[in-house]
């Protein structure tokens, strides 16, 4: 029996690289080349995604396609404005709602008092206790607000009376000064008294107006306000006056045309004017004055003769179809003779007052009687209050400037 000879073991030697079999990975993605704009997008395990506007066909080429159509509009452009136009809310009756009140949300600013004991408290507490304006001060503030109302054009207030010596010229100076002081705008008073009126003396400093209507109209090329003012006098508050003719040796015949030229020229420089007429209500210039007036102050003194003169003046205006002007006018009773009684004021108010807009009273004041020129701060507080009240009532007509023609 033949015995097998054991074979020697082959020693392990490092294998040559060429003999080493390298196992390939089960799956390996090829490197992704940079994608050009418009190229298709390929994702593993997914179909080729074509870019917008391209679609592969059967040959593998890509063809251009139109973008998808936009979705239909949710509204018609032609009718959308009509759909949302304002209209009556038919469901308003089904529910009620309240509006937000500003005063409940925002703390209202309280105007510090400027007069009376409230001002004393405010000042003494170093402005820490502000009680606000009292009733009298609130009334004063309201009247000043009305006086400063805008005038959309020109506005003329005329003082008229059938009787002289009732304080008419003084009233024009006082009301004009009040308006000028509170409005802080140019105001002019014009003396349309054909017989040497005193208005210029009551307003101009030193009682000497620099010129009169005659010289004012003689300047043919008057277009500058600064040049025009050299013909006017003024008082400390700035009220300006165009005086009548003071020359007794060379009187000025105040015709309707002269007045029309005067008022037309002054209205080019002043929105607000006051006109003082003479007691001769039948004078030829009166119709021209009334035709340019927006409101009247029908002036009378607080005695029987003054009351009768007021009534007769109202009758005269009514007989000439001046009802519209009367509705915008005030009867002003001046206590020039210091004889006012409540009975007299009540009588005039009840009998004649309903024919005009209202009846106002100016109390006696020594400064009104004696002053030349008039200074507002020199008047008694009661007189100042009465003048401010009258000015506020007249100012309520400012927004209607131009409503009356002829």
Image (cartoon, rainbow, N blue to C red):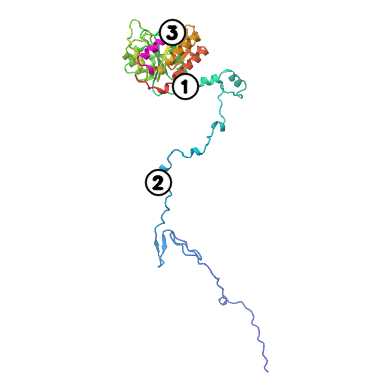
User: Can you say whether 244 is above or below 183 in the image?
Assistant: above
Main secondary structure along the magenta-highlighted residues: helix
Q: Is residue 319 magenta?
A: yes
Place of residue 231 in the rendered image (x, y in percent of width and height, measured from the top left): 38, 14
Q: Residue beneath label 3, please?
A: 306
Judge by depth and name the residue closer to the eye, 397 or 23. 397
* Contact check, label 3 and label 2, Cβ < 8 Å: no
| Quarter the C terminus occupies | top left
- Depth check, mark 3 against mark 2: the one in front is 3
Region of the chain picked out in magenta, as a range: 311-323
User: Can you say whether 252 is above or below 185 in the image?
Assistant: above
Give the mark nearer the N terminus: 3 vs 2: 2
Crowdedness of circle 3 by 10 Å Cα count: few (<14), some, many (20+)? many
Q: Residue beneath label 2, please?
A: 77
Residue 146: image tag: 1
User: Is there any visible trace of residue 344 in the rendered image?
Assistant: yes
Place of residue 269 in the rendered image (x, y in percent of width and height, measured from the top left): 38, 20
Crowdedness of circle 2 by 10 Å Cα count: few (<14), some, many (20+)? few
């Amino acid at each position: 029996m033949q015995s097998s000879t054991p074979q020697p073991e082959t020693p392990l030697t490092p294998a040559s690289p060429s003999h080493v079999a390298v196992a390939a990975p089960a799956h390996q993605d090829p490197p992704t080349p940079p994608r050009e704009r418009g190229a298709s997008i390929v994702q593993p395990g997914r179909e080729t995604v074509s870019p917008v506007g391209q679609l592969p066909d059967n040959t593998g080429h890509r063809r251009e396609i139109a973008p998808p159509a936009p979705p239909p509009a949710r509204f018609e452009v032609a009718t959308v404005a009509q759909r949302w136009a304002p209209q009556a809310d038919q469901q308003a009756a089904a529910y009620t709602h309240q509006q937000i009140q500003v005063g409940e949300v925002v703390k209202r600013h309280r105007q510090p008092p400027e007069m009376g004991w409230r001002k004393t408290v405010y000042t003494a507490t170093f402005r820490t206790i502000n009680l606000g304006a009292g009733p009298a001060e609130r009334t004063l503030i309201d009247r000043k607000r009305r006086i400063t109302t805008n005038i959309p054009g020109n506005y003329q207030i005329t003082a008229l009376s059938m009787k002289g010596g009732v304080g008419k010229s003084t009233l024009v100076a006082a009301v004009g000064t009040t308006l000028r002081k509170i409005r802080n705008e140019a105001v002019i008073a014009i003396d349309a008294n054909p017989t040497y009126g005193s208005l210029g003396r009551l307003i101009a400093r030193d009682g000497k107006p620099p010129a009169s209507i005659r010289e004012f109209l003689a300047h043919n090329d008057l277009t500058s306000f600064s040049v025009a003012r050299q013909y006017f006098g003024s008082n400390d508050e700035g009220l300006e006056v165009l005086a009548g003719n003071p020359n007794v040796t060379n009187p000025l015949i105040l015709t309707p045309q002269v007045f029309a030229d005067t008022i037309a020229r002054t209205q080019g420089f002043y929105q607000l004017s006051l006109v003082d007429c003479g007691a001769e209500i039948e004078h030829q210039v009166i119709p021209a004055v009334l035709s340019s007036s927006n409101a009247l102050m029908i002036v009378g003194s607080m005695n029987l003769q003054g009351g009768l003169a007021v009534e007769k003046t109202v009758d005269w205006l009514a007989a000439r179809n001046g009802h519209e002007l009367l509705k915008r006018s005030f009867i002003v009773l001046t206590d020039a003779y210091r004889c006012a009684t409540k009975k007299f004021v009540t009588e005039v108010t009840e009998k004649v007052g309903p024919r005009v807009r209202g009846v106002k009273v100016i109390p006696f004041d020594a400064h009104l009687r004696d002053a030349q020129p008039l200074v507002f701060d020199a008047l008694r507080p009661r007189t100042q209050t009465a003048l401010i009240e009258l000015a506020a009532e007249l100012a309520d007509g400012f927004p209607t400037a131009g409503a009356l023609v002829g």
